[in-house]
C-alpha cells in the first residue's frame, strides 16, 4: 500500500485547492528506500546511505507545525517529539516563527553544494535531527513543505517532478504567511517582532557552536519568553481552525500566484496526453546495457529505462506526426508501446513540436 501523499493538514488544504486527490508516488517509498544499495552490496555513486536516506536535511519548521508535534499524543510520535524538544532546548534558531536551520548545518550543507560534493543522501553529518534510528521520520505526520513534497523518483518523471516542485513552493509561501499571521494574532510585538523581520542581531554571536545566548532568546521572544511551548501550541490551534478560503485570504497574491501554478501542474499530472508531433531533445547521459538503456533527463536519481534496441530509432522523432514515426519504428522490428511513448514524453526525452 502506498503512503499518503501529504501530511493530514496539508492534504486537507490541497484537496480544497485542487478539488481531487493527488496521485500517490509509488516509486519512492520511505519505508523501503529505492535509493539505498541492496543488502550486501557496496554503495554506488548514486546510492544513498541507509543511515541517512534522503534525510540529509534539516527542515525549517513553522510555528504551527512545531505546536502540532507538541500536541500530538500518539505514542508512536513520542520519539519524534523528543527530537523536536531537543531542538527547542538547544535554542538555535528557535523563534516565535518556528525552528530555523542551525547556521553550522547550513555552512556544511553549502560547502558541499559549492564544491559539487555528492553530499545529499550520503553525509551523516547532515542528517536530520528527526531521523530516527529505525529509519523513520519522527515528525512524519507534521513534516513541512520540503519534506512533504520531495521524492527521489516520480511515477510520471519530469511531469511529477514539476508538480511536486510547484507544490513545495506553494506550501513554503503558505507556511510563511501563516506563521507571521499567527505571531501577529498572538501579540508578538515591538522589539521582538523587529527581530523576527530583521533576523538575529550581530551582537548575538554566530551561534555556530550550537549554543544559544539567553539574552538573545529573551530579546527574540519578548513577552513570550519562557512560554515558547505555549505560543507554538496556540499557533497550531489557530491554524488548525482555519478554512482554505481564510488561508488564501491571509496569504494574499503571493499564495494566489503559487496556487495557480500548482493547479496548472496538477492538470498536467492527472491528464496524460501524447502530442501529435514530437521531436527528440539532445540526450545527456545514457547508460547502455545489453537489454536496457538508462536515459538521464531531468534528474540523475530517476533515469528512464527503455529497451536498448529503441535508442537508435529515437532520432526518427523529428517533428513528423507521432503515429507515423511510431509505425516506422514498429515496422523496423522494435515494438513501441503506448506506455513507453508516454514515458518518453513524461521524462522530457521527446517534446512537442
Ligand atoms: S523531517 Fe522527517 S522527512 Fe524531513 S528530513 Fe527530517 S526525518 Fe526526513
Image: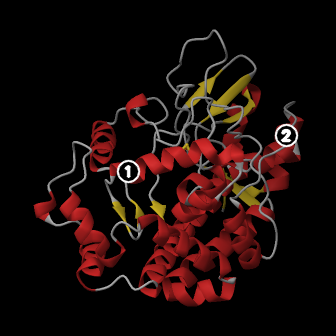
Residue 317 in view, yes or no? no
Task: Give the residue drawn at x 74%, y 33%.
Answer: 306
Earlier in the chain: of badge 1 and badge 2, it is 1
Q: Which mark is residue 270?
A: none
Q: Which residue is mark 1?
A: 89
Task: Give the residue drawn at x 73%, y 51%.
Answer: 156
Which quadrant contains ligand 1? top right
**Front one among 214 and 345:** 214
Vertical position of residue 18 compared to residue 77: above or below: below
Q: CA distance from mark 1 to mark 2?
A: 59 Å
Residue 51 position in % (x across, y down): 54, 26
Pick out the residue farthest to the left. 203
**Front one among 89 and 347:** 89
Q: Which residue is mark 2?
A: 336
CA neighbours of label 1 inside 10 A, class few (<14), some (14 to 19), many (20+): few
Quarter the C terminus occupies:
bottom right
Nearest to the eye among marks 1 and 2: give it: 1
**Front one among 249 and 162:** 249
**Front one among 326 and 24:** 24
Residue 323 in view, yes or no? yes
Left or right: residue 3 compared with residue 186: right
Q: Secondary structure at mark 2?
A: loop
Task: Give the residue drawn at x 33%, y 69%.
Answer: 225
Q: Secondary structure at mark 1?
A: helix
Q: Quadrant of residue 313?
A: top right
Amino acid at each position: 500500500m502506498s503512503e499518503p501523499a501529504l501530511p493530514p493538514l496539508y492534504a486537507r488544504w490541497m484537496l480544497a485547492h485542487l478539488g481531487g486527490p493527488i496521485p500517490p508516488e509509488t516509486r519512492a517509498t520511505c519505508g523501503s528506500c529505492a535509493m539505498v544499495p541492496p543488502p550486501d552490496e557496496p554503495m554506488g555513486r548514486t546510492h544513498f546511505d541507509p543511515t541517512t536516506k534522503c534525510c540529509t536535511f534539516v527542515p525549517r519548521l513553522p510555528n504551527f507545525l512545531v505546536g502540532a508535534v507538541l500536541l500530538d499524543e500518539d505514542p508512536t510520535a513520542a520519539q519524534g517529539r523528543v527530537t523536536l524538544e531537543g531542538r527547542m532546548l538547544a535554542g538555535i534558531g528557535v523563534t516565535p516563527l518556528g525552528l530555523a536551520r542551525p547556521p553550522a548545518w547550513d555552512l556544511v550543507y553549502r560547502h558541499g553544494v559549492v564544491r559539487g560534493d555528492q553530499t545529499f543522501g550520503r553525509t551523516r553529518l547532515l542528517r536530520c535531527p528527526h531521523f530516527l534510528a529505525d529509519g523513520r521520520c519522527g515528525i512524519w505526520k507534521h513534516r513541512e513543505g520540503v519534506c512533504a513534497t520531495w521524492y527521489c523518483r516520480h511515477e510520471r518523471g519530469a511531469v511529477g517532478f514539476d508538480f511536486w516542485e510547484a507544490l513545495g513552493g506553494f506550501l513554503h509561501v503558505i507556511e510563511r504567511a501563516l506563521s507571521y499571521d499567527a505571531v501577529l494574532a498572538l501579540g508578538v510585538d515591538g522589539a521582538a517582532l523587529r527581530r523576527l523581520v530583521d533576523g538575529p542581531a550581530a551582537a548575538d554571536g554566530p551561534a555556530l557552536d550550537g549554543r544559544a545566548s539567553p539574552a538573545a532568546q529573551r530579546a527574540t521572544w519578548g513577552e513570550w519568553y519562557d512560554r515558547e511551548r505555549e505560543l507554538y501550541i496556540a499557533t497550531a490551534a489557530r491554524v488548525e481552525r482555519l478554512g482554505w478560503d481564510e488561508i488564501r485570504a491571509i496569504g494574499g497574491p503571493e499564495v494566489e500566484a503559487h496556487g495557480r501554478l500548482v493547479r496548472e501542474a496538477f492538470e498536467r499530472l492527472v491528464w496524460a496526453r501524447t502530442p501529435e508531433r514530437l521531436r527528440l531533445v539532445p540526450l545527456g547521459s545514457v547508460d547502455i546495457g545489453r537489454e536496457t538503456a538508462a536515459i538521464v533527463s531531468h534528474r540523475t536519481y530517476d533515469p528512464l529505462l527503455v529497451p536498448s534496441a529503441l535508442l537508435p530509432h529515437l532520432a526518427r522523432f523529428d517533428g513528423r506526426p507521432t503515429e507515423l514515426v511510431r509505425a516506422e519504428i514498429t515496422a523496423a522490428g522494435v515494438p513501441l508501446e503506448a506506455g513507453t511513448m508516454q514515458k518518453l514524453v513524461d521524462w522530457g526525452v521527446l517534446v512537442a513540436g
